[in-house]
Image (spheres, rainbow, N blue to C red):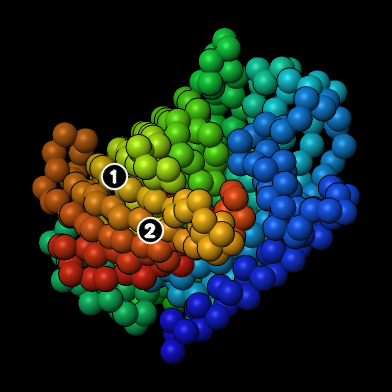
Amino acid sequence: MRRVLVIAMSAAAIALSSRAQVAVADTVYSQANNTIIERLDNLNRKVIGSLAEGREATTSGSRRFKVIFLPPPLGNLPDYGFALGVGACGLWKTQNDPLLYTSRLPVSVKFGFTSPFSFEARMEPVMYFNRNKLRVSARAIYRHSNEHYFGIGYAANRTMERSTAVTGYRSRRLDFTPEVEWRLGRSSAYLGVVANVGYESLHDAGSYVAQTLEYAALGGTASRSTLTEVGAGVDFSVDTRDNMLVPRRGLTLDARVLFYAKALGSDFDYTRLTIDYRQYARTGADGGTIAWGVVSSNVLGGSVPLNRHATVADGYVMRGYYGYQFRDKSVLKAHAEYRYMLNLNTPAGMLLLNRFGVAAWAGVAATGSNMVRYDAVLPELGAGLRLRVTPRSHLRFDWGYGTATRDVMFYVGVNELF
């Protein structure tokens, strides 16, 4: 019954998204002889393509602010259940310069159909200045969600009973991460400074969570505890992807280190180091893409907050495990995925069949107490279906299998996870 509901809601979301984009296409392109499909394709190549690539599709230097509706935030996650929302994005240029990348302001709100109720509001502006030599961005998130904490390490986490009354807690979290980056010459690389300010209130802790030393370190009681984090650091990034939503070639690298200190107003002193490398290549077959990457997540220091350790499943890779079930000081992940969208040069293909595709992947994660000592290995396998909504956007249905726990996870989402 639940899967039927998910598929029905997905179909409704596709219909609403298509109608909204066709309406915008009629405004942008007044071509009376075009079919609805042609107008939709034109809109996405020009506008959504610009959003995904971070560049204006024409040589116009206009600073006019435009608003487009994004495919609705939609998904099903094992930890959070089915969710649906709304999203829009503002596009503009900070200067009258035809070579300046387009600045963007995506905003979304997503509601989780869980008990108790959960939701997330997200805003992630990116602005370019001075012939793309300066990039200013930020991520602001407010989330009210149902979370779980299984402890630190592998052995205990694997056998821990998963239930709201034992491992669960309610989280209300506000997180703000601004960045200022400078372009290195004419390359695609940026180097800059980054900060993070976060506040979290934890409520209704389960019996196991309430008795852990990590929870006690937050102060408060089993009914409510709080966590404040203030950190600053540096970030190095490279991004040559052809598309941010559904990439088919290029690479992305993000390496950052953040220092959290009581001197800055944080409740804990510790350091977070993350290196995230991903690459994409087209295969010989039309419509085929191979994506692979390596992610190293690490926390350094003796006083790391309860839920800030490195995790195996983060919603982007390792989809065969519950999010945040396995935590430790260091987690190293490697993954590879093959994606194929049908590309039939027939009337049936161009009208309907080319909207479908498949994906398959494999990954492995290692957890340990530091960056050179890992004591557990967690492999996973997965496969999925794809349904193209627009030339730059599609629905994703994924099944992940974690061999260490023998759990099967089902996901629904918009666009690729990485």
Q: Residue at x 31, y 73 (%)?
A: 167
Q: Residue at x 36, y 70 (%)?
A: 410
Residue 201 point in image, percent of width and height: 52, 64
Residue 83 point in image, percent of width and height: 54, 72
Q: Residue furthest top?
A: 185
Residue 204 quadrant: bottom left
SS assignment at label 2: strand
Using the image, determine if residue 240 lies above or below residue 34.
above
Q: Is residue 64 visible?
A: yes
Are there few (<14), some (14-19), or many (20+) residues within 10 Å of tag 2?
A: some
Q: Residue at x 16, y 34 (%)?
A: 372
The amino acid sitting under disc 1 is Ala
Q: Residue furthest front?
A: 346
Looking at the rendered structure, the number of numbered marks drawn on it comes to 2
Residue picked out by circle 1: 336
Q: Residue at x 51, y 20 (%)?
A: 189
Residue 315 quadrant: bottom left
Left or right for 20, reference 167: right
The amino acid sitting under disc 2 is Val
Are there few (<14), some (14-19), or many (20+) residues within 10 Å of tag 1?
A: some
Q: Is residue 173 visible?
A: no
Residue 354 point in image, percent of width and height: 50, 57
Using the image, determine if residue 54 lies above or below residue 27.
above
Could you tell which of marks 1 and 2 lies nearer the N-terminus? 1
Who is closer to the viewer here, 65 or 272? Answer: 65
Mark carried by residue 358? 2
Q: Residue furthest bottom?
A: 1
